[in-house]
Amino acid sequence: MARNMTLLTDLYEITMAQGYWSQGKLDTEACFYSFYRDNPFGGGYGVFCGANQIAELVDGFGFTDDDIEYLASLTTAAKTPLFDPGFLTWLRQLELSVDICAVPEGSPVFPREPLVRVTGPLLQCQLLEPAILNGINFQTLIATKAARICKAAEGRPVSEFGLRRAQGPDGAMSASRAAYVGGCASVANVLAGKRYGIPVGGTHAHSWVMSFPDELTAFRAYAAEMPDNCTLLVDTYDVRQGVSNAIIVARELAQNGHRLQAVRIDSGDLAWLSKMARSMLDRAGFPDVGIVLSNDLDEYTIMSLNDQKAQYTSLGVGTHLAAAYGQPALGGVYKLSAIREPGQDEWSPRLKISEQLYKRTIPGVLDVRRYFNADGRLAGDLIIDVNDDVPADAIMVDPLDATRRKKVEGCFETLLKPLVSDGRVNDVDLSAQSARERCIGQLAILDDSIKRFMNPHEYPCGIERGLFQRRNDMVIATGRNSSLYD
């Protein structure tokens, strides 16, 4: 059963909703789109994630009696009721009738292109803004971080260990799901495993070892409990001695038809210690016993480990992944791009101009055409208005620099896919497993120059030339003059 997240909205959305209600705008239709302006972590791409929360929001939408009672208790600065009783009565009966299209989860995405498009009654579109952004901003951020970390791991499995450092229970659940979508092989979070069907894994804590008289006794006890799922944490006291004790237990397991899976090192000079552990295990006849490294890892420390020829078979990454170290928020926004008044067939584009070109939006009912090279690799994304006739050999224009242009033609797909129709979630696959497969497959056809961590190449993503010109014409038509020149 979906959670009711209807009140997961900002107060001003509801006060604006009352304004739309009282101003007779219930039949005015709107088109909003969400996007971000800069790639996270200084990288060359993002990984879209969070459509599952949009679906949950829509499935559970509806103001309850308790919600209405709470809203009725809110007052103005003058201590009068904030909301009109008639509006609250109407709100109690509200049912969604919006359409929502979204980029498939796990897809690489880029600045300024639409990630989600919401069309329908203006009032309803407005109410959904905060919860939609809450879902996609955080999960996209974490999925992108996970993709970067998994790239650094060069194909070796990464497990997400961040539950205890995540931003509260909801943050932990979202982080585990998004980390899996971004490429992690498993998570430590058992509730996430149950809810999202994600593989779970883990070892034991230092406290397990410390609770026994000595390390070898602790290892033997754990192996007895988990003979076919035994990974031993070897750095509670001394890694060399810990690996020696693990080898003793590995021999005892082998005598009984079982196998030690791995040893884990969670502190110290991971590169040096991992090479020492590998040498000891190999000399003892256990080349198949893996080595798990953890301890505040991120993509850059993992790259350093690789440069030092660290010996590891998998990684556990916690804080830097689940808490999105390096960038606490994505900064995605949700902007009005078109209005359709009652009785009209055509949409009227809307544009936020702003004092900064950087914040200028794109008008129209927007979508994205993703083009492919002849070899199947990603070639560029073209932002279009779905109501325009886009030529086969379209020209994309950089949103911030009209002199930067590129012709795009050939094979393409339309990126925004129907998620919600007339207020009901469509029968679409929103599983974390499908999104993870898509992420791995799509990143494989994204050029390596865009995926590099330092000074990544810029992926071609721009506005269709006709739409770009319309935007410029709208700016000029406002008669806007910058205050800098007054």
Image: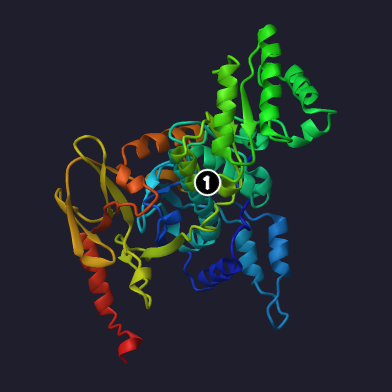
Q: Is residue 61 above or below residue 204?
A: below
The residue under label 1 is which amino acid type? Asp
Q: Residue 162 appears at what percent x and percent y?
A: 62, 44
Mark 1: which secondary structure? loop
> Height in image: 281 above or below 66?
above
**Residue 35: percent from left, percent from top:** 41, 57
- Closer to us: 184 or 117: 184
- The way the protein has been coloured in the rendering is rainbow
Task: State whether residue 477 appears in this view.
Answer: yes
In this rendering, would 177 be left or right of 206? left
Residue found at the far right of this picture: 213
Q: Is residue 301 left or right of residue 455?
A: right
Name the quarter where the N terminus is drawn.
top right
Please give the name of the residue rendered at 30% of the width and 89% of the height, measured from the top-left corner. 485
Relative to residue 336, is residue 238 drawn left or right?
right
Q: Residue at 41% of width from left, 65% of height from top? A: 336
Quarter location, residue 84: bottom right
Which of the two residues, 445 or 55, is positioned nearer the viewer here? 445
Q: Nearer the viewer, residue 17 or 257?
A: 257
Residue farthest toward the bottom in the current orientation of the protein: 486
Residue 49 seen in this snapshot: no
Residue bearing mark 1: 298
Residue 256: % across, % down: 70, 7
211 relative to 380, above or below: above
Total residue callouts: 1
Q: Residues within 10 Å of mark 1 (few under 14, many from 20)?
A: many
On the image, which quarter does residue 16 sit in?
bottom right
Q: In the rendered image, which quarter contains the C terminus?
A: bottom left
| Image location of residue 68, percent across then percent down | 69, 61
